[in-house]
Image: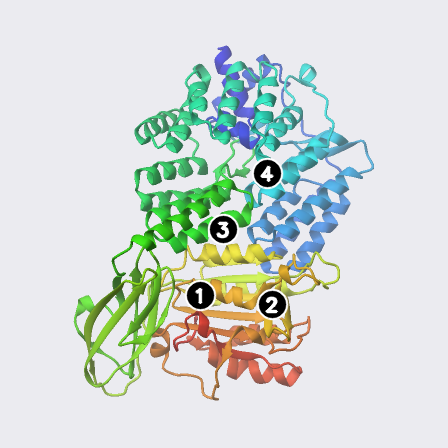
Amino acid sequence: MVAMQKKNNYRIFCGSVLLCLFFSLSVFAQTKAEKRAQKAMEKLGIPPTAPAVKVSPEYERAEQLVNEALAQLTKGEVNRADSMVRQSIRLYPTKEVFQYVKAVCEMPDLNKANALMDELYQQTKVFPDEKMLVLEPIASAFENGKMVAKVKLYEKERALFNIGYEAYKVNKEFGDVKRVERSIQTLLGLNLVNTAVKVGYDFEYNQLEQFKIDLALIQKDFEKAIALTLQKPISLYHPQEAKDALLAYVYQEKGDHQRALEIANTLAGNYKMTGYKLKFMSYAVLGKAEQALTNYQLYRKENYAFISNDLFYYLAIVDIKKGDFQNGLNNLDSALNHKMANSMNGMEVLFIDKWKVYKSIGDAYTGLMQYDRAKDNYNIALLSNPDYEGAVTALVNLESRIASTTSTDKSGPVITVSEPSVKRGLKVTVSGNDLMVRGVASDPSGLKTISINDQVIYSQPGGNFWGSVNLSNGLNKLLIKATDQAGNTSEQAFEIEKIIVPAEIIAVTEREGNNYCLLIGAQNYADSSIPSLENPIQDAVRLKLLLKNHYNFDDGNIFTLFNPGANDVKRQLLELANIIQPEDNLLIFYAGHGIWVEKEKKGYWLLTDAKRNDPNTWLQNKDVLNLIAKLPSRHTLLITDACFSGGVFKTRSIGKDAPAAIASINQKVSRVAITSGNDTEVPDESVFMKYLVKALSENKEKYLTAQKMFITQIMEAVMTETKTEPRYGTLELAGHVGGDFIFTKK
């Protein structure tokens, strides 16, 4: 009975990420569990749930304002929503604000999210009363068969902890290592006295003690983490088994998996399940697949109600160690996207840090000998955690592996033509004089050049290639030559017969590709000498709603980056390389400051972490184009609403008649851009954006090309109303062949 009481206690109080790792058990999902839980709480000295505290009118209005702000955010009224949530914070600091913060993180706009959380914490700090109404951190009452949290009165220091603890959880889920570390350090500045003798269990105090260990692990001070773990006193709420489980985890983080296994093997009773999970994790890293999977099955049998992203992560580690790299990538995708719902309060918690997942994605691509993609994912990991030793070491090892492979490589690339499909025969009926040829030339050394009939075409180091070939009437012989970085060449020949057909309107057919969109809005700048802007985020949200509601863009395929730093943009573009397929289309929109350096003839985006006097903090247009060039999408459209944005492309002359042969345009790979100005300043109140939105809103055509939209709806209108000259051009260095981006209405 005592064991069952302890087990139930941990179901109620396992609130932190680390404790959840060890002690998360089945949620009390059925009403029949309520009496058992309450009896266990009484036996353990935990007071029964206090009646709900009557909240003040200010508290109620503050929560109401947050809900109204969320509604405005959904409508795209970002500025109004932000104003309302700040009004709520000033009226009465409540945890309801974190609902808005999480919505902002989902955008994502981590800078704004952290600014709101800082403002909430500071308002709590200066709150005039000694006690405050705060929603408890761990649900303690049953309502309608599930655990719910109640609003209670807290002393100021504990109110601060609870607000800061929520901020920590948000940063753990959405932020990088620096933000998590900062959250913990803020909390460790508080002074809490253990009240366990009076109340039976002191969540805030125990979590604060746990954060000391967490901080040591983040700072890689493993000896300190071990010492702090050993110093934790034994109690009813932290028995020896719990201490051992925590110690095993610390050894795992240190990389001493043998020691972790020794400790995990001693766990029994209520901690047997925790032991299974710890052994699964250690055996996975050690490459002992059979033992790892055995313990995984035992853990899942005992803990069927919970599945979290750490399980997918370690299953992927097993796959990679076995050489099943594709299945490893599938599990790592689940690790990135699956979030476990905490049984106590519905908070979604990510147990495995994103940089660890991306490093393992790099390992999987290394195993598949796709070294370019491996390097990209190692770099994604380092953009989130620059000091992550695993990714640094992996990059060094990868460079050595590439050098070794190149020096011993005696075979040419393996050429696979995906378009046209030569498997379906040699004849193809075409209405034009050229043909799109596309495929992959795989080689562990990396692709150097590729040509068709001795004409070099566009290619990427990872092997993707495409180009347009002129056709003569009758039989055309095509010879593809691919050369790798080691100098080896391979060839593939096939024939295409051009058959003359009568001129006719070509029907446009739906392709299997998806439409993706990345919306970037830089608005609030950290450097006070760079003026913040009013509308980029609101403009981006308005564009999102247009694309989602009226064009073929699914909500899940629209990515947003609001108030990002330069590394955030790089990371997102690299992440898209893991998602975008050759038949997909991509629209990229940037609104924010730009700058042109005449002496260098270079243009830059100024993201929110840019410093006016430090060019090293600016994002060069060329770097953006290089990242776009990595994306294998069929059509990519870059729209920039920024000063001096004309330097992103080589322009081409455009006539007054937009292309009409939609099918032909759709076939060819395109990399085009529309910018709000050439090498001039543009106003903060964007006229360009007004006419872009107007063009898409009022469009009646099923298929609208970017070029036609620009000529008929944007160019003349903007030039008439302002002194700026919007531009349309091609991104030659990113692989433009001759097509165009097509907006398809629903």
| Residue 483 placement (x, y as % from top left) | 30, 65
Residue at horizontal 57 percent and vertical 45 percent from the top = 176
Residue neighbourhood size for the residue with mark 2, other residues' Cα within 10 Å, grouped as few (<14), some (14–19), many (≥20): many
Q: Identify residue for label 3.
A: 380
As measured in the structure, the alpha-carbon distance from the residue carrying label 4 to the one carrying label 1 is 36 Å
Q: Is residue 722 above or below residue 132?
A: below
As measured in the structure, the alpha-carbon distance from the residue carrying label 2 to the one carrying label 1 is 17 Å
Q: Residue furthest top?
A: 1
Q: Amino acid at mark 4?
A: Lys
Residue 359 in view (yes/no): yes
Q: Amino acid at mark 2?
A: Tyr
Q: Identify residue for label 1.
A: 629
Earlier-in-chain disc, 2 versus 3: 3
Where disc 4 sits, the SS reads helix
Quadrant housing residue 683: bottom right
Q: Is residue 524 left or right of residue 10?
A: right
Residue at horizontal 34 percent and vertical 37 percent from the top = 321
Where disc 2 sits, the SS reads strand
Q: Residue furthest front?
A: 407
